[in-house]
Amino acid sequence: MKVDKSELTLYSRIFYLLAVCAVVALAGRLRLRAVDRLPIDYDEDDYLRSAQLIAAEIQEQNWAGLQETNYRQEHPQLVKIAYGLAIAPLDRASLIPDQPTSASPAPRLPEPHYQIARKLSALFGSLEVLALAVLNPLAGLFLSIHTFTIKYHSQIMLEGLPSLTSALTVIFYMRAKNKLGMPIPNLWLLGSALFLGLTASGKYLFAIVGIVILADGLITAFHKRSWSPVVILLGWGLLSLVFFFASSPYLWPDPIFRLKESLLFHRQYASTAQEVQAAGMPPWQPFIWLFGSVPWHPGVFTVCLDLIITVFALLGFRSLWRERRLFALWIIIALAFLLIWPTKWPQYILILTFPWSLSASYGIRDSVWKPLIAWRGAYKQKTKMPASYSNLWRAALMLLPAGLAITAITFYPLFFQGAMAFTDFSAQSLRDGLNGGIWREFFRGISMQVPPSEIDISPFASNQAVRYVGLAWLEGVYARTPDLVFFNLMWAMLAVLLQIGLGIGTALLLSQNKLRLKQFWMVLFILPWAIPEFVGALSWLQILHPQNGWFALSGRSFGEIPGNPFAAAVATWQSNPLSVLLVLLVVGVWMGFPVMMLATIAGLKTIPRDIYDAAAMDGASGWALFWQIIWPMVLPLLAPVIILRMITAFNQFYLFYVLNPPFGMATFSLVSYFYVKEIGLYSASAALNIFNILILIVMLLYFNRVSGANKGVQYV
Amino acid sequence: MSKLSFRKQILSQLALVLIGAFVLLPIWALLNISFDGALKGAPVELRLFPEEFSLAAYIRVWTDPAQSLNFLGLLRNSLTISLGAALLSVIFGMTAAYAFARFRFPGQRGGLFALLVGTLLPPVALMTPLYILLSQLGIRATLFGLIVVYTSFTMPFVIWNMRSAFQAVAKELEEAAFLDGATLFASFWRITLPLALPSIGVAALIAFIVSYTEFAIGWLFVETSSNVTLAMAVSGLMGTSRAWSNMAALSVLMSIPVVILFILLRRYLISGLLIGALED
């Protein structure tokens, strides 16, 4: 997507321009629609009140008053001044009352002030889309339809302006670099500093783009072995501080104290505010926001593709890192910050939706566009060669038994499951379902003979017959399970990573020459793999059971031990999302590391001895030996095992069944089983399964592409 | 790597002891409770060793594992179902696996992809459709019905692995047989199959384990207590009110044969796993 402008023909320039215009028009349209339809949210009254106070000072031409007017002083002043300027020409409305931040949203706000302020925010949001669309129209399209971005840009919130200026900060910095990738002092860099200052006085959080740029500068300095980027960025940082103070009149009378007061609030707020505590969100909650569209306002957002954007952003991240490292750094630093920061409000994810959308456009290029081109090329080539139909007949005969069997008992049920997801088949309509009701309704539904019915899942529903419900279940699963999708992926990823770590570590220990008791340890370490999964989980339950496990009992047997908070913390692991994850990971690693260990041992045997000796001659240390020789030689062998383990972990059932973590922290398999066994909602379970399989197929295609680089390596 | 120094030997052994402790911890917890004769229900105090060592729980579950069958009856059901599923998967899949391994034909890539999708299906994805299908055929609650259910879980995986096993046998061997006038069938039967047999055995063993240890979906299908398997019986003993010793003892009993098999066959198992590589 890196376009060299000089090579563009006139037509493609016009097309480019049209695409940018179309994207910005769409962005504006969607944001205005949201301005009209979104209900009044928390905090909107606070910021509008703040704007009213500032507008009053402006109307009286009392510019010095700005130095003392900053209602909700924990947030910087610039966006409030912008709102104040926007409503200053209007007639003054009665002042919105001062209420605590935890108060429920105001029932009504003064018109048209409220509309005007919202539209101003939407304007900033649309301009952000414009900035991205100029860079890459497809990415701009993604940003324009991202529902969380639309929501917080179409309300009287603080996000609009700093979103725009933070994007400009990074873009201007990118422009300030010379051909060697070194930032040089020029007007672009000055602009970058200006926008960073404005960003910080818009909302502190967005100033992390400053950290991103510093990180990029440090990396550049390291690669080029030159101090000049660091020096230049130092000047740039000081300049942006100047701009920050210049754009925050409230700080002028007493800069240090007021800034400290304002910043300290956030730390206190995170640890003491009731609304933060009550939310009880897991550390990874921001990721969950990224994995779904805004769930609170049905009917406001016409397209809900946030999950799709996230999937493509993940798929495109590798290319983004290679081709536009600055934006990849932005994503990494923003994600790390969101993960660590204790307050988890959904609007915070807006600090990264800009690079996220860009990454998604790379994902489209890598995972849709390129394969399509390659497929077309391969298809054209293939049609030139005669297909070997002679083999087909011989093969057909041999394929017949398995083909029939597997179609009958695996693929037909799979399609049946797909059809079921379009109905409301449940325990109440079991009889009808057994008599062919599912296919009947499915075909009547997709041939438009019957309209989709409403889903009625109350236990008193009297639907004796299966009914067609259209895409209702599938849409429901798509829209309502961001926590499950994210947890599943995170679980599979972390569990397998830890398994690889412990597995390789153990294998390296065991592969040492002349190690004593080698066979003994090997047999011992295989045990977790040999023991059936649910028996392994049952074993851990003896230790981890919240009432009767070792940790819980240790408290009871010795009285409440004040000196042993660890046991108490482990015993109550089910009450806190982070400890649930840790406990599950410990058990997951226990179950999975032996396979990795065995595979690595097998792989190590294939490395010829001479290589070690040669490396030793060159004086390679243990660390270098591992990363330069062992890892690259063992990885191709491990790749298939890793993929298998990922899929196994993604589908893991018994571990969760036995240990029984809280709802929302389980695999799709378990939730789907729960729907069948406990609730009897077979159709909901079917929709969950179909969704699960789609994710697995995407994962498989991705792995296939990534490990395609290793093609040609013979396994074993 | 040269010979280990004494210091390295000690450090390595220490690290291995730590990992060993991690591995043994839950196993010990289970064994501990299974040998605890004093335990009536759930444990109410922390005991790292049995208060009184006894085999009572083992004897109890041997004669009366809280099902209408005794241990041997449950084991017979488990073996019937698991061996049945493994054998069905191998027998039905063998020729197809060979065709995928040896021939190039139109639709091959599509077929392989479908097979791969089949291997990554979670078993729960098929439970309701199979329930309806087998009910319509009138075999849902029979042992044969369960065999069919488990075959549907294991067959794609077994075919995939057998294909890799056949591919690992050098094609030149077969071509030499053709030159000597052997038919396709003869060369398959006399040369390729015997050479691939160890890997096929591993695939079958993994299929066996899947069926042997499954209970959640099995419970949905079984109606009569005479068709209950060992794994289902263990899950029947789960729950805080029952004697935890019985559950522990039964799960230990059912794990022993599998564990022994794994330890004996560990070399073949890992090569079987690696051969099932997704090399396409």
Image: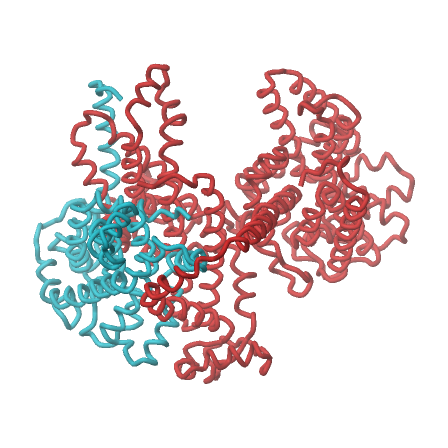
Chain colours: A red, B cyan
Q: Is B225 left or right of A164, judged from the image as shown?
A: left
Where residue A164 appears, x then y in whole percent? 74, 41
Relative to the observer, which residue lies in front, B34 or A50? Answer: B34
Relative to the observer, which residue lies in front, A311 or A99? Answer: A311
Q: Residue at the spot x=18%, y=68% of the render?
A: B77
- Quarter of the image for the N terminus of chain A: give it: top right
Q: B5 above or below A274?
A: above
Q: A682 above or below B191?
A: below
Relative to the observer, which residue lies in front, A118 or B97? Answer: B97
Instruction: Say whether residue B179 is visible.
Output: yes
Where residue B108 appears, x then y in whole percent? 42, 57
Residue A170 sits in quarter? top right
Q: A218 above or below A481?
A: above
- Quarter of the image for the C terminus of chain A: give it: top left
Relative to the observer, which residue lies in front, A297 or B163? Answer: B163
Instruction: Say whether residue A274 is visible.
Output: no
Where residue A491 appears, x then y in whole percent? 42, 48
Q: Is A365 left or right of A634, judged from the image as shown?
A: right
Q: Is A40 left or right of A458, judged from the image as shown?
A: right
